[in-house]
Image (cartoon, helix red, strand yellow):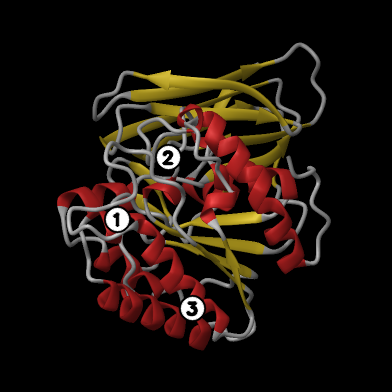
Amino acid sequence: MTLIPLSQPEISPLLFGVFRAEEESEGIFPNRMTPALRAFYTYSDAALIRARCTSGARLRFQTDSPRFLLRLRTGRQARARHCADLILDGVFTQSFRSPAQPGAILEVAFEQTDPRPRLVEIWLPHVTECWIASLEIESNATLTPTAPPHPALWLAIGDSITQGMEASSPALTWTSLAARSLGVGLLNTGVGGAKMDPQAGHIKEIPAAVISVAFGTNDWNISKPSSQFESDARRLLDRLQSLHPRTPLLLLTPLPALRKGGERNQAGVELERFRETLRTIAAERNNLTLVEGTSLVPPDPVAFSDGIHPNDAGMAVFARKIQPFLARSLGLQPPLPLR
């Protein structure tokens, strides 16, 4: 059989975890940012690139095509990992990789001898800019967009840890793992290097059923004054709760910091002071649950790539520990036990 390319109007509905699919010269761009967020994260070249990485974006569809071929064109990178993950019928199948250079073509190919319908999920690069150049299926096959089992959308707001910066592939970030396990939608607006800022709350257009907020490590690392951190946190939460007053909020305190020098920054301030600030703010608010970051990932170097960012092992523990909080907020049963 001959493989035939799908058109842009046929591909765009297959994208989940994006705010909007946009046509650009390189192909279909899976944009996860609202217009205001996109404008905000232009304050540096690094922020702009990280905001254009497609963390949490995926193609999700049902097809009886015995073969399909997806071509992605990669661009600027936050990390030198140009990869996409294929999940078939809920089972992680393979990571596909291309040379870590702008303009590389990353191919995700599948072929089976048994022409039965399959649920296909392809997680797009989490630390690389990318465009969908083409998607081809066999000429006589069918293909249908397939949303996650639960209609709820989880909006994850945060920094590089939320973006999943040190996960080895996009389906292995803590947000991707937790969303897949719970069967919920995910829109990840995490941006590496981001700090607590009310501008991160430009999410009016996003119909979130639960929102997680995870900032603080970068604020501490640059020695932001505690009073400024408190003001920024209050203003961000005020914005989120005014825009989505009925949406449960999960406020995560910073994870353990295992870097040389421990949890004391250059100004001599302990990271625990930033956690305590968030505890105080959380205690004053309704419809908000504080989640202790120190309970989500153990203070063990085995769980971190650099003492700050969780590696794959740390991401897996993080996903498992956050699930009960997400499930409770959405009225679901967590599928995995706490360990």
Q: Residue at x 73, y 62 (%)?
A: 151
Cα–Cα gap, marks 2 and 3: 33 Å
Picture disc at residue 34: none
Q: Is residue 185 above or below residue 317?
A: below
- The quadrant of the image that shows the C terminus is top right
Q: Work out whether mark 2 precedes mark 3 in sequence or the reverse, and give the earlier one.
A: 2
Disc 2: which residue: 126
The image's mark for residue 280 is 3
Report whether 174 appears left or right of 115.
Answer: left
- Asked which quadrant contains residue 319, the reply is top right
Is any part of residue 16 visible from this angle?
no
In the image, taking residue 223 as reference, residue 259 lies left or right, namely right
- Can residue 336 be seen by looking at this rendering? yes
Residue at the spot 39% in from the left edge and 67% down from the top edge = 34
Q: Residue at x 79, y 43 (%)?
A: 337
Residue kind at label 1, given as amino acid type: Asn
Quarter of the figure that contains the N terminus: top right
> Residue at horizontal 30%, vertical 48%?
50
Numbered disc in front, either 2 or 3:
3
Q: Which residue type does callout 3 highlight?
A: Thr
Q: Residue furthest top?
A: 113
The 10 Å Cα crowd at callout 3, few under 14, some 14 to 19, many 20 or more, is few
Around disc 1, counting alpha carbons within 10 Å, would you say few (fewer than 14), some (14 to 19), or many (20 or more)?
Answer: some
Which residue is at the front of the view, 164 or 285? 285
Q: Nearer the viewer, residue 145 or 99?
A: 99
- Front-most of 54 and 322? 322
Q: Nearer the viewer, residue 69 or 283?
A: 283
> Callout 2, which amino acid?
His
- The residue singled out by tag 1 in the image is 218
Q: Earlier in the sequence, mark 1 or mark 3?
A: 1
Quadrant of res 97: top left
